[in-house]
Image (cartoon, rainbow, N blue to C red):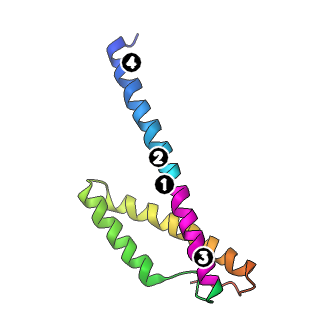
Amino acid sequence: MIDPKVKEQLGQYRQSIDNIDAALIHMLAERFRCTKEVGILKAQYELPPADPAREEYQIERLRRLAKDAHLDPDFAEKFLNFVITEVIRHHEAIAAEHGEPKQTV
């Protein structure tokens, strides 16, 4: 049997985790709303879906932020690479919808 105080503390931690997860989902949704607008702008002006210089800058920036926050920078980079890959996929789809040829890097 779990001590009631331990059970209560565990429940509080889990509630915090659930709240953080919800915030992460909402933040990701907002990020993708913004990147969709970037994709539309890129398609309108025939810019490539990917921007390697921007991606490199963002990865380095996120690694620094992760280190400052005591989060594993490698994990942060993997996470951002996953997001970047998805954004590029969306930008390619938007370009295709606008009649632009699909460009990959």
Residue 37 on the magenta segment? yes
Residue 34 on the magenta segment? yes
> The N terminus is located in which quarter?
top left
Q: Position of residue 55 (x, y in %)?
A: 44, 77
CA gap, disc 3 and disc 2: 24 Å
| Label 3 with label 1: CB-CB less than 8 Å | no
Dot 2: within a 10 Å radius of its alpha carbon, few (fewer than 14), some, or many (20 or more) residues?
few
Residue pointed to by mark 3:
39
CA gap, disc 3 and disc 4: 47 Å
Considering only order in the chain, which callout, 1 or 3, is on the residue closer to the N terminus? 1
Dot 3: within a 10 Å radius of its alpha carbon, few (fewer than 14), some, or many (20 or more) residues?
many
Q: Nearer the viewer, mark 2 or mark 4?
A: 2
Question: Which amino acid type corresponds to the residue marked 2 in the rendered image?
Answer: Ala
CA gap, disc 2 and disc 4: 24 Å
CA gap, disc 3 and disc 1: 18 Å
- Residue at x 47% of width, y 46% of height: 23
Question: Which amino acid type corresponds to the residue marked 3 in the rendered image?
Answer: Gly
- Residue 13 position by quadrant: top left
Residue pointed to by mark 2:
23
Considering only order in the chain, which callout, 2 or 3, is on the residue closer to the N terminus? 2
| Label 1 with label 2: CB-CB less than 8 Å | yes
Dot 1: within a 10 Å radius of its alpha carbon, few (fewer than 14), some, or many (20 or more) residues?
few
**Position above or below: 14 against 51:** above
Q: Position of residue 15 (x, y in %)?
A: 43, 31
Residue pointed to by mark 4:
7
Q: Secondary structure at mark 1?
A: helix
| Label 2 with label 4: CB-CB less than 8 Å | no
Which region of the structure is painted magenta? 27-43
Question: Which amino acid type corresponds to the residue marked 1 in the rendered image?
Answer: Met
Q: Nearer the viewer, residue 71 or 1?
A: 71
- Disc ID at residue 27: 1
